[in-house]
Image (cartoon, rainbow, N blue to C red):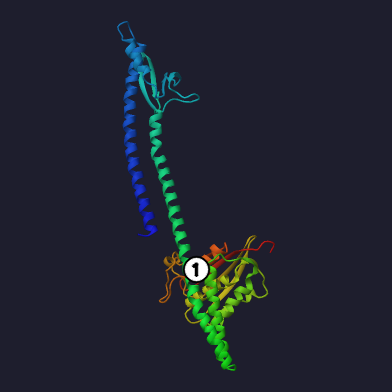
Amino acid sequence: MSNRQIGSLVLVIAMIIVAISVLFTNNLARSLQQEEQKNMAVWAEATRQLILADDDADIDFVSSIIEGNTTIPVYICDSEGNILASRNVPEGKKGVGEHGPIELSIAPGVTQYIYWDDSNLLTSLRYVPYAQFALIFIFIAIAVMIMLTAQRSEENRLWVGLSKETAHQLGTPISSLNAWQQLLADKYPTDEYVPQMKRDIDRLQMIADRFQKIGSEPTLKPENLIPVVRSAIAYMRARTSSRITMDDASLEGVERIVMLNAPLMQWVIENMLKNAVDAISGQGTISFHLHENEHDIMLDITDSGKGIDAKAQRRIFEPGFTSKDRGWGLGLPLAKRIVEQYHGGKLLLKHSQPGVGTTFRIVLKKAENS
């Protein structure tokens, strides 16, 4: 069972507990309210008998009933609504009670009225479900935070382990290829393919270095973002069909200084461009636009490809999710990790429309004093 399913199950159980608690508490509150209403009827009768008491009346018994009410705020009013007497009423309380009235016929033509409020116990009881709901909500929030923290920690260990192991595994064959390439260069110094082999081996070495950087804390320093972006564009342009135009005219002569690890950021841009190329069937355009505010530089990468449907948009940054027939579904999650966790920026899907195209936005912090 996934963390999302566990979280949903916990939420459902919590809601069931709250619903049962509310029903039970409301039933208990209704029963207590009915009991208080009966007690007030008895109290009103005792008050009437005390007012009309004669020599045969049991004053002590009647008084004990009246004095026995120590929790219910009660008011005795005349026909004009003026309070004649009160009991258990908090200081500063204005107006008469919410319940009533009970009529007291004191004498022919003379009637008094008894009003009352809920007791403190009944009032407190009505708030119990809200307190329970708040406690359960806090519990769920803490549980979700713990699960997310544990999941993020596990993902971090997975990424670091995977990256270090990949760099390690690439190291040995790259060293061997370097040795063989050097032997070929010495034996065939004029062969036109040997330099190309060297470039490809250097490329493999750079990829291994990138994985090594992901497996450790990368160093950021103030650098111009534009040469990094244009280097990635040049690399992809040489390996992409001429029917796909990479329009980087907006980057010509521009300088934007950000806190950067250049090799990792170039990897991010290359990954975004590969996705854009894959999204374009045949002929299309990939364009670049820069925006900025007081603190951030924003790079938008827009393609005229097939777009992403709404359902897939919610999952594109999940590890393992891919819409391609061939793919691991790790490119965008890895790019997001590099931008957000290593550079303190943001990588987000700005907008996408099926059949029209897609725009991703990379947000990076400006270097101080830039």
Residue at the disc numbered 1: 334
In the rendered view, would you say 322 is above or below 11?
below
Report the front residue among 188 and 126: 188
At a point 42% along the width and 40% down the height, the residue shown is 131
Percent x, y of residue 43:
34, 19
Report the front residue among 202 and 12: 202
Pick the quarter of the image with the C terminus: bottom right
Q: Amino acid at mark 1?
A: Leu
Report the front residue among 151 and 41: 151
In the rendered view, would you say 365 is above or below 239?
above
- Which element carries disc 1, helix, strand or loop? helix
Percent x, y of residue 365:
61, 62
In the rendered view, would you say 126 is above or below 251?
above
Percent x, y of residue 128:
39, 37
At a point 35% along the width and 15% down the height, the residue shown is 64
At a point 52% along the width and 71% down the height, the residue shown is 211
At a point 39% along the width and 41% down the height, the residue shown is 132
- Tally the numbered discs: 1
Pick the quarter of the image with the N terminus: bottom left
